[in-house]
Amino acid sequence: MSEQYLLEMIDIEKQFPGVKALDHAQLKLRAGTVHALMGENGAGKSTLMKCLFGIYTRDGGEVLMDGKPVNFSGPRDALDHGVAMVHQELNQVLRRNVMENMWLGRFPTKGGLVNTRKMYNDTKAVFERLNIDVDPRTVIGNLSVSKRQMVEIAKAISYNSQVIVLDEPTSSLTVQEVDKLFEMMRMLKEQGIALIYISHKMDEIFEICDEISVLRDGNLVM
């Protein structure tokens, strides 16, 4: 059964003092789909994602990628294994340029020095794949929120991510910017990438999502 799913979170449990945050929670994600993760504030969405990314150690259950058990030690470990997250609050170095933000912590080097030409070319290659019209040398703080968000998605792709989590990605976007984001999401679907879309906006979910999971009190109810 697992072979049809790219990512499976099965019977995930997480307890904090006096609170059972996740009670056998489930999430199953197919390649090339957008999967909505919904629920009221406090339903367990963030806790489930933190268990996926190794920010929290789960108390029970298992996570499978391509049918094989995984246990990420943290977000960087998840990234290195093809699972990325674009947070609602973008974590970027606003005074540095786009390509430096893209490759922060993994700058290409040549002769012990940062290979700026390779970093520029590698950034352009990812942008062309995603149809992003941004100069890699632009200071990222000078970009609109939507373009900064696109850079974060491109950064996830640069890690060869198979799964990308988008946390309330349209909260600060205009209608036109949402359309551009959805265009990129459809492009990623066509490339076989799976997207987890966390949102409360029903019109957007019906427009862009293929499947829906709803959490309530740490349980899957739909």
Image (cartoon, rainbow, N blue to C red):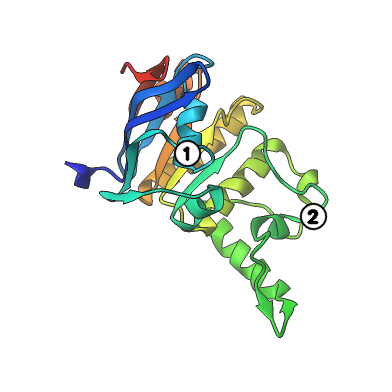
Asked which secondary structure carries label 2, the reply is: loop
Task: Please tell me the numbered disc located at residue 183.
Answer: none
In the rendered view, does 65 fall on the left or right side of 169?
left
Q: Residue furthest left?
A: 1
Q: Is residue 122 left or right of residue 56?
A: right
- For residue 37, which quarter of the picture? top left
Q: Position of residue 16 (x, y in %)?
A: 51, 24
Structural crowding at the residue carrying mark 1, measured as other residues with C-alpha within 10 Å and reported as few (<14), some (14–19) or many (≥20):
some
Q: Can you tell which of label 1 and label 2 is closer to the viewer?
A: 1
Residue farthest to the bottom, as pictured: 111
Is 158 rendered above or below residue 22?
below
Q: Nearer the viewer, residue 111 or 158?
A: 111
Instruction: Decide: few, some or many residues near mark 2? Use Cα within 10 Å; few <14, some 14-19, many ≥20.
Output: some
Of marks 1 and 2, which one's residue comes earlier in the chain? 1
Q: Nearer the viewer, residue 10 or 104?
A: 10
Figure quadrant of the N terminus: top left
Q: Position of residue 65 (x, y in %)?
A: 33, 49
Q: Label 1: which residue?
A: 57
Please state the horizontal and vertical placement of residue 216, each as a whole percent of the image.
Answer: 41, 14
Can residue 62 be seen here? The reply is yes
Q: At 46% from the left edge and 53% from the top edge, which residue is drawn?
A: 161
Q: Amino acid at mark 1?
A: Thr
Residue extending furthest toward the front: 17
Quick one: quadrant of the C terminus? top left
* Number of marks: 2
Label 2 belongs to which residue?
96
* 205 relative to 92, above or below: above
Residue 11 rendering spot, x and y as whole percentages: 31, 30
**Which quarter of the figure has residue 4?**
top left
Q: Is 38 drawn above or below residue 157 in the view shown?
A: above
